[in-house]
Image (cartoon, helix red, strand yellow):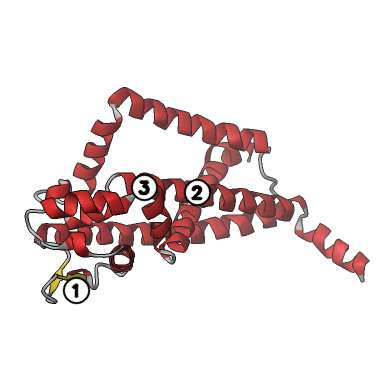
Amino acid sequence: MNSFKRFFFWPVFFSCQLIALALVSWHLLAQFHFSYPLGYQLLDLNTHIAEFAPQNRYKDDFELTTPEDHWRLFGAISDAVQASGKGLREISYQLKNGEITALMHEAEIIHLQDVANLIDVFYITGTSCLLIWIGLIFFAHHQRLTLPSIKKILLGFLAGFAAITTIILVIGATEVFYWFHVQVFPDGHQWFFYYQDSLMTTLMKAPDIFAFIATLLLLLLIALWSASLYGINRLLRFPPQQQSNTKARKR
């Protein structure tokens, strides 16, 4: 039983917990469009857009749009990729002559559809892990298991984080970034865009906005992870029989 817990149960338990809470963190932040207005201010995106929008080789007049337009457009992109890509082609802005034009050209729309498909897979995976994790919590409670010590849990996560970081540093962050995109996106689909070729990329000041979003996700994930560990630890400290006795004494 000890080997089962050490080499199978708890690794699966904590892996499912991490993936499930990553999904919860993502979903919560998506409801607020990943705090884009805050990132907009911190990354000085207005200045960035003013510099590169006039250089765009496909679209005109984007430099005339306002910060409120930028927030709306990013929110529309965020909502669309959360909705399996629905609405991507309808995202638009107004030209100086009053006409409405699409924000993105075909290659950008195809890329964001690929992103939406990837997010759909993330939701399926994360939801599955959430259900497994909940089931394992009930199993641990029924079997009167107790969590490993916080020290062991932290050491396990730090060891995994250190291993991944070491691999990235050895291979190179840029090479890992490119490899990841090659693996997850279909062959022949463009995923790298220069600012001069993409209002989508200009709007986000990619990849800077991704670092901002990743920071928010990490902070929220740590908070949810810590809170869940606290709650589970309290639950598992009292086996079913002991909880019944405690309730009886209160009466």
Residue 229, percent across and down? 64, 49
How many neighbours does mark 1 have within 10 angstroms: few (below 14), some (14-19), or many (20 or more)?
some
| Residue holding disc 3 | 43
* Mark 3 crowd level (few <14, some 14–19, many ≥20, 10 Å Cα): some
Q: Is residue 71 above or below residue 44?
A: below
At mark 2, the secondary structure is helix
- Amino acid at the residue labelled 3: Leu
Label for residue 90? 1
Which quadrant does the C terminus fall into? bottom right
List x then y, in percent, for residue 211: 37, 44
Q: Secondary structure at mark 3?
A: loop
- Nearer-the-camera pick, 182 or 49: 49
Left or right of 73, for residue 109 = left
- The answer to which of marks 3 and 1 sits earlier in the sequence is 3
Comparing labels 1 and 2, the label whose residue is closer to the camera: 1
Q: Please name the amino acid that badge 1 sits on.
A: Glu
**10 Å crowding of disc 2: few (<14), some (14-19), many (20+):** many
Label ID, residue 18: 2
State the image coordinates of residue 189 (x, y, percent, origin top left): 12, 52
For the N terminus, the quadrant is: top right
Disc on the earlier residue, 2 or 3 = 2
Q: CA distance from mark 3 to mark 1?
A: 27 Å
From the viewer's perspective, is 218 left or right of 102?
A: right
Q: Position of residue 213 (x, y in %)?
A: 40, 50
Question: Quick check: 6 left or right of 188?
Answer: right
Q: Write the residue at 21% across / 57% down.
A: 200
Please say if the residues under marks 2 and 3 sit with CB atoms less than 8 Å apart.
no
* Residue type for callout 2: Leu
The residue that appears at 28% across and 50% down in the rendered structure is 47
